[in-house]
Image (tube, rainbow, N blue to C red):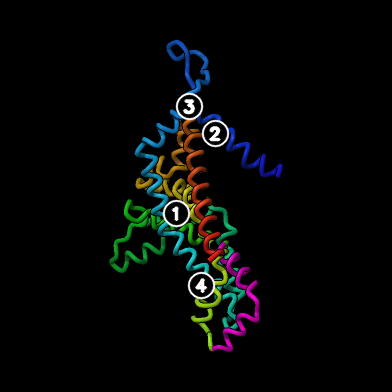
Amino acid sequence: MILFLVVYLIPLGYSLVRSVFRKQTSGIGIGPPTDVFVGLANYVDVVTSPVFWEGILRVFGYGLIQIPVMLVVAMAIALLIDSRAARGRGVFRLSSFLPYAIPGIVASLLWAYLYVPQLSPVIQLVQSWGWDIDLLGAPTVLFSIANIAIWSWAGYNVIIYTAALQSIPKEVIEAAQIDGANGWVLAMRIKAPLIRGPIALTALLSTIGSIQLFNEPVVLRTITTAIGAEWTPMMLAYNATFAANNFERGSAISVLIAIIAGILAIVYRKLSTRGSES
């Protein structure tokens, strides 16, 4: 409880307090700055800014690309690991977990190397076949970022799904096999429905993570002009806080991001409760 208070509630409370103030200098602007209470003015400035909503649309678009693909890939690997008939399950388990063990910044740097045409052996090979491909242009950069996140986080979901699959009673699986359920039918009709809770939880965590998208675009921004300094809400908050030295506006953006994440968590709880009751 104390750890939760220190790590989460105190920083959030401080941001909430700072978000209702603004710095104001006296005289002609050379006097010491003072805090002036402005109420919800910072929030009004943020929600009326087109840049904020453009960033929101980007992260939701990113989520629509990244989350379904990542969860399907993670589920496929987890089912393969859980299958007794599959060979090399240890290899799949290790290979799926290794990308998750790599820090996000490092993973972004590795993929950035593969995205630059002058450096990437993959792109150079594709171009030698006569295909012109640009993974850092405005139409494709969102997919490139989603690819990094899928590669980095699929292993995390594999761990959750594998643990959930292994908790299914053996009697249920054996009864289904006696009734003739094997392979695809056993995986999709028996196993997957029994782990709906973990699937919904990972979908929620992935959605909240997509709203907080920061590392990947910050790294790729150094090698492409398609990503601006305020490309996502988190980048907007970072730029306001540290580049513009406007801690109050940055706090307001951070609180709004936390509110959106909280709303998603409430929706998840309502849907999961309704699903368990039905």
Q: In the depicted view, which residue is nearer to us: 240 or 39?
A: 39
Q: Nearer the viewer, mark 2 or mark 4?
A: 2
- Alpha carbon of mark 4 to alpha carbon of mark 3: how far? 50 Å
* Residue identified by numbered label 4: 76
Magenta part of the chain? 157-179
The amino acid type, in three-letter code, at marker 4 is Ala
* Residue identified by numbered label 1: 112
* Residue identified by numbered label 2: 16
The amino acid type, in three-letter code, at marker 1 is Ala
Q: Residue most toward the top?
A: 27
Q: Residue most toward the right?
A: 2
Report x, y in % for residue 173: 60, 81
Residue displayed at 52% across by 83% down:
183
> Label 4: how many residues lie within 10 Å, few (<14), some (14-19) or many (20+)?
some
Q: Is residue 85 above or below residue 264?
A: below
> For this view, does 156 lie left or right of residue 260?
right
Which of the 4 image quarters holds residue 8? top right
The amino acid type, in three-letter code, at marker 2 is Leu
* Residue identified by numbered label 3: 39
